[in-house]
Image (cartoon, rainbow, N blue to C red):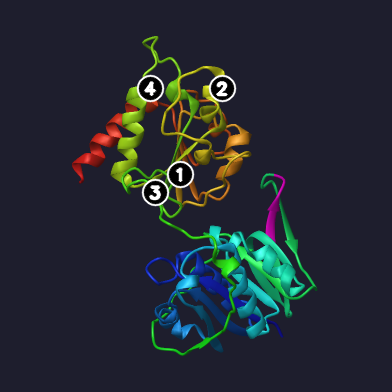
Amino acid sequence: METILVLAHTETDGLLAKAALEALGAAKTLGGTLIVGLVGENVQSSANSIASCGAAKFLGVTGPDFGQARYATDAAAAEAICKAAGATVVIAPATSRWNRVLAGVAHRLGGRADTHVTAITAANGVVSVNRWYYRQRMEAVLQRTQRPWVIALEAGCCEAWKGSAGSTTVEAVAVSLTDASKQTTVTGIRAPAADQQTIRPDAKLLLVAGAGWTKTQPDGKTHTDDAEKLILGFLRLTQASLGSSKSLVDLSGEGQAVLPFMSHLHQIGQTGATPRHPKGLSTCCHGEEPHTVGWRFVNERRAIDLNPNCGWARGKADVLYVADAFAVMTKLNELLATKK
């Protein structure tokens, strides 16, 4: 029987992120002995919030040195918890903080690590993970005999654990740190204001803007400024997340007009991100395969395009609106504004 450790770190508010609760929910489906390991400046509140999860015990590495993301201290903390738990399978949310250290931790433990895992199952006592390859066109099911097996679970792939809070005891795990391991210090965080943030992984709606927004319109002119107002206005009214097609973010290299708030971070598709929003609306995209491959996990897909024979019309969208995106989005923003 596997000893399963859910490894999580606290957020700035001292609690656990949704991704950590998803990792806990996945671990609960596997059977075996469940242990929870927490890292942070103070983990008691986090432990209490999941006290009813059925864990055999809670382990914690705490203190000011573990409140910030830092490879040396995070790796030492994760290694110590894994050893204290005697874990054979370690499941952690694929956050930027854990993604930096998990491979190194697995090496220290003499185990193996798998990242970008999208599903974890167990049958007849054998644990299997799902992972996508070749630009997310092929899915593989993997099993390993090497232990410990460290698994980084992608966010949005599993149901988050839900249960009542309570009170529990956290066993402290000691970690010895040298001065050299504490040399890196986070002096601050620079982030855009909430109303300027355009990439929102937890948003219910994904809006994708294609190259058509910057092309010549029926009046023979480009309307990039109008496109910017319409897109950002829609994001402000709906709090949707923003994506783009490869062609749009590459237009600057072709000497064409671009939307200044777009970057390669927004790119959706074969050479970009593969989001998992419940709903998606594509505007001014042609719906070709390199772009739509990134939409495979969006549950409900709709598109606006003037071409009734575009790729979206060939079964890649649930609904295609054959219309001018400028006109549709203008009216849509007007309707949304009246409901505020």
Amino acid type indicated by mark 2: Gly
Residue 14 part of the magenta-drawn span: no
Residues in magenta, as a range: 130-134
Categorize mark 4 by other alpha carbons within 10 Å: few (<14), some (14-19), many (20+): some
In the rendered structure, find residue 253 and report the number of the disc placed on it.
2
Marks 3/4: CA–CA distance: 26 Å
Q: Is residue 186 left or right of residue 223?
A: right
Amino acid type indicated by mark 1: Gly
Q: Is residue 275 left or right of residue 222?
A: right
Observer-nearest residue: 44 or 21? Answer: 44
Q: Which residue is mark 3?
A: 191
Marks 4/2: CA–CA distance: 17 Å
Q: Residue at x 44, y 48 (%)?
A: 279
The location of residue 40, given as percent across then percent down, is 47, 73
Observer-nearest residue: 135 or 191? Answer: 191
Q: Single out the mark in the foreground, 3 or 4.
A: 3
In the rendered structure, find residue 144 and report the number of the disc placed on it.
none
Quarter of the image where one finds residue 30: bottom right
As drawn, which residue projects farthest toward the right? 145
Is the Cβ of the residue at disc 3 closer than 8 Å to that at disc 2?
Answer: no
Marks 3/2: CA–CA distance: 27 Å
The location of residue 57, given as percent across then percent down, is 55, 88
Quarter of the image where one finds residue 196: top left
Marks 3/1: CA–CA distance: 25 Å
Q: Which residue is mark 1?
A: 280
Observer-nearest residue: 107 or 210? Answer: 107
Is the Cβ of the residue at disc 3 closer than 8 Å to that at disc 4?
Answer: no
Q: Secondary structure at mark 4?
A: helix
Q: Which residue is mark 4?
A: 224
Q: Earlier in the sequence, mark 4 or mark 1?
A: 4
Quarter of the image where one finds residue 78: bottom right
Q: Residue at x 59, y 39 (%)?
A: 269
